Image: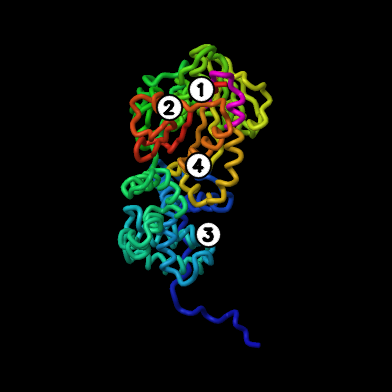
Amino acid sequence: MSDTSRRPRKPGKPYRRPKKDPVRVLAFEALRAVDERDAYANLVLPPLLRKAREKGDFDGRDAALATELVYGTLRRQGTYDAIIAACVDRPLREVDPPVLDVLSLGAHQLLGTRIPTHAAVSASVELARVVLGDGRAKFVNAVLRKVAQDDLDGWIQRVAPPYDDDPEEHLAVVHSHPRWVVSALWDSLGGGRAGIERLLEADNERPEVTLVARPGRATTEELLGEEAAVAGRWSPYAVRLAEGGEPGAIEAVREGRAGVQDEGSQLVALALANAPLDGPDEKWLDGCAGPGGKAALLAALAAERGAMLLASEKQPHRAGLVAKALHGNPGPYQVIAADGTRPPWRAGIFDRALVDVPCTGLGALRRRPEARWRRRPEDLDGFAPLQRELLRSAIDSVRVGGVVGYATCSPHLAETRAVVDDVLKQRADVELIDARELLPGVPELGEGPDLQLWPHVHGTDAMYLALMRKVG
């Protein structure tokens, strides 16, 4: 046998170690956590960024780019999948998920940012070499060079069906939403192309950070003294932070006197608190209190009237978050871990009750863009019985003359009006209150008596609220 160990290497380029780019590696790690562990980007990304800063790998610009890469890729995933599918020689489901994540990150840099084409391709290939190996990096290079042959508008013309042929699929590809979500949102809006396009576009925009000044503990004037802070649009307790504002750097937030809370959630709590009531106003209930944002605002509003709040949350770890949010409240409150469908409290003892029920979360797709790809139409069947039971229990929990609020962070008709209608058909002891009258100055709340908020109209999550009074 001949000795081959001493044969000279074939001529060619010397091997070069891949250059590790901390920003893109971190973005890839965040996307893998979202895919592999069903994690949420808004929970995964902050600790990754904090660790990178502590190691000295990141500055503010790096953190901003990593955030844009992660959220931009997740928001546009459906559009990018359609484009990548047109550039590979196999069904997309046969592409390994880590490879698809690198391709999607590359597609976003090419089609959704101002990063130059050559830089976007070369950075993505280097990332592939680091996290996938040289072999699959060649595949990434070949695919992204095809993607780079056109801009986003050009690709959409090629991969999306014409609107006149298939309106829902056209909107699904153009605006990167599952087709069933497009259909459901369109039904909730009540038809018309302009409205659904504005809503889908709003879902793909970066949401503002909104703070709440908890009454008796902080004021909007205090928060407005912070850099980049402006007044909220609708809630008297809301303050918005301009892009780049960091809530954790604000003293009132660190101390729990203020919190991060979408203005739609604030309005739901305010509407319940403002509902007219005959008789005592001493005991309030938040029957689905986790993670505690609405409970903290309700408890502060209750304290101003000398009332107490019972905050109930089924999951113990979420009940712990509620307790943390309410710590320091100026009035009496209690936090318990309990199942709202089998409550430990006696019936008819509360004056006001809110149930912000578990739902698909289709109203918060700006903040959790990955949720649109996780949810399925059959999820509605899983939530429906629980939503109805929680509403029935809340009605049972208030006295005659008491007020109940049913809220969801979803505009889907199956989670909103269908639930309220079904429960009220079975009960003669409840009447609906016109919730719109309790939010004066807030426009376009729907036909009533319930109300629906919208990202493209109000700049809030798509919160739904029905208010009802127990009459017998």
> Measured from the top left, where is residue 291 in percent x and y?
56, 32
> Measured from the top left, where is residue 206 in percent x and y?
38, 42
Left or right, 9 with respect to 119, comes to right
- Dot placed on the residue nearer the N-terminal end, 4 or 1: 1
Amino acid type at mark 1: Leu
In this figure, which residue is indicated by the disc labeled 4? 361
Q: Quadrant of residue 357?
A: top right
Amino acid type at mark 2: Asp
Image height of 309 relative to 249, above or below:
above
Q: Are marks 1 and 3 in contact (CB under 8 Å)?
A: no
- Dot placed on the residue nearer the N-terminal end, 1 or 3: 3
Most foreground residue, 359 or 316: 359
In this figure, which residue is indicated by the disc labeled 2? 434
Residue 250 visible to the viewer? no
In this figure, which residue is indicated by the disc labeled 1? 298
In this figure, which residue is indicated by the disc labeled 3? 98
- Dot placed on the residue nearer the N-terminal end, 2 or 4: 4
Amino acid type at mark 4: Gly
Q: Is residue 87 magenta?
A: no
Q: Tag 4, which secondary structure?
A: loop
**Of the numbered discs in the image, which one, if any, rests on residue 213?**
none
Q: Are marks 2 and 3 in contact (CB under 8 Å)?
A: no
Nearer the camera: disc 4 or disc 3: 4
Query: What span is colored magenta in the figure?
Result: 391-404
Most foreground residue, 219 or 333: 333
Q: Are marks 4 and 3 in contact (CB under 8 Å)?
A: no
